[in-house]
Structure formats: C-alpha cells, structure tokens
Amino acid sequence: MGTAKANLLKPSNPWRWHPEIIKWTVALHAKLPAAYNPIRHSVFLSLPSVLTINKYVHLSKAEAGFIPSIVQRVVNGISAPPGEQRENVTFVLDEMKMKN
C-alpha cells in the first residue's frame, strides 16, 4: 500500500521524453503547428506540450556566425569516453538573402 500512496504524492507530470520523440515532435510542430494540439489532445497519441517543445527549440539564441556555446556543446557530444557509442552530429545551415 505504501507504493500506491507514494504514486499519489508524485507530481502530476512525471514524463521524461525520449530524445527521438522530442526530435519528432519538434519537426511535427514546425510543419503543422495548427494540427499539433488536436493530435496532442487526442487519445491516440501522448505528446509533449508546446511549452516543452519550445524549451528545446529555444535552447540557445540565434546569432550570425559560429556561436561558441553551440560549438562547445557539439564538441562535448562528440568527445565520448573510449568504449562509449558516439552520436552523429549534423550541422544545418540556414541562408537568408536581404534586399536593400
């Protein structure tokens, strides 16, 4: 009975989302923002809230050029201890043309 009581005292949102789910939902919300909430509130899928997605999307400020904090985060992700699996990292470049 102690476990049932402990479960009742836990926070109402104990979810920890898998990184692949976060990546997928960020892409889904970027493509179909108007359809995301109806999908999220359906009983078919359990998806993170838009606030949770925004925390991942706005993790760092966008600036021109190489941002040292992001480069350091990528280097830390690549520099895995020997024997650990390394992840592939992809750089995405965004271009913008400005008219005078």
Image: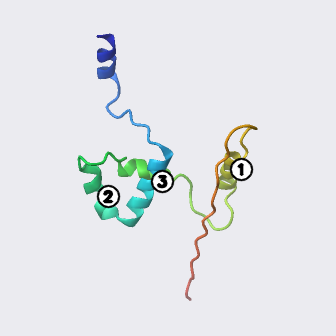
Q: Amino acid at mark 1?
A: Val
Quarter occupied by residue 6? top left
Residue at image position (63%, 60%) is: 90
Mark 3–mark 1 distance (CA, rounded to whole Å): 20 Å
Q: Amino acid at mark 2?
A: Tyr
Q: Is residue 18 left or right of residue 81?
A: left
Q: What is the secondary structure assignment of the residue under circle 2? A: helix
Above/below status of 46 relative to 28: above
Residue at image position (57%, 62%) is: 62
The residue indicated by pointer 3 is 23
Query: In the drawing, what numbered circle is on residue 36?
Result: 2
- For this orientation, the residue located farthest to the right is 82
- For this orientation, the residue located farthest to the top is 1
Asked if the residues shown at circle 3 and circle 1 are in contact, with their CB atoms under 8 angstroms apart, the answer is: no
Residue at image position (25%, 56%) is: 38
Q: What is the secondary structure assignment of the residue under circle 3? A: helix
For marks 3 and 1, give the one nearer the viewer: 3
Mark 2–mark 1 distance (CA, rounded to whole Å): 33 Å
Mark 3–mark 2 distance (CA, rounded to whole Å): 14 Å
Q: 10 Å neighbourhood of mark 3: few (<14), some, or many (≥20)? A: few
Query: In the drawing, what numbered circle is on residue 75?
Result: 1
Q: Is residue 6 left or right of residue 95?
A: left
Q: What is the secondary structure assignment of the residue under circle 1? A: helix
Q: Is residue 55 among what the camera can see? A: no
**Which mark sits nearer the N-terminus, 2 or 1?**
2
Q: Is residue 13 among what the camera can see? A: yes
Tell me residue 68's x, y (percent): 70, 55
- For this orientation, the residue located farthest to the bottom is 100
Q: Amino acid at mark 3?
A: Lys
Please identify the quadrant where the N terminus is shown. top left
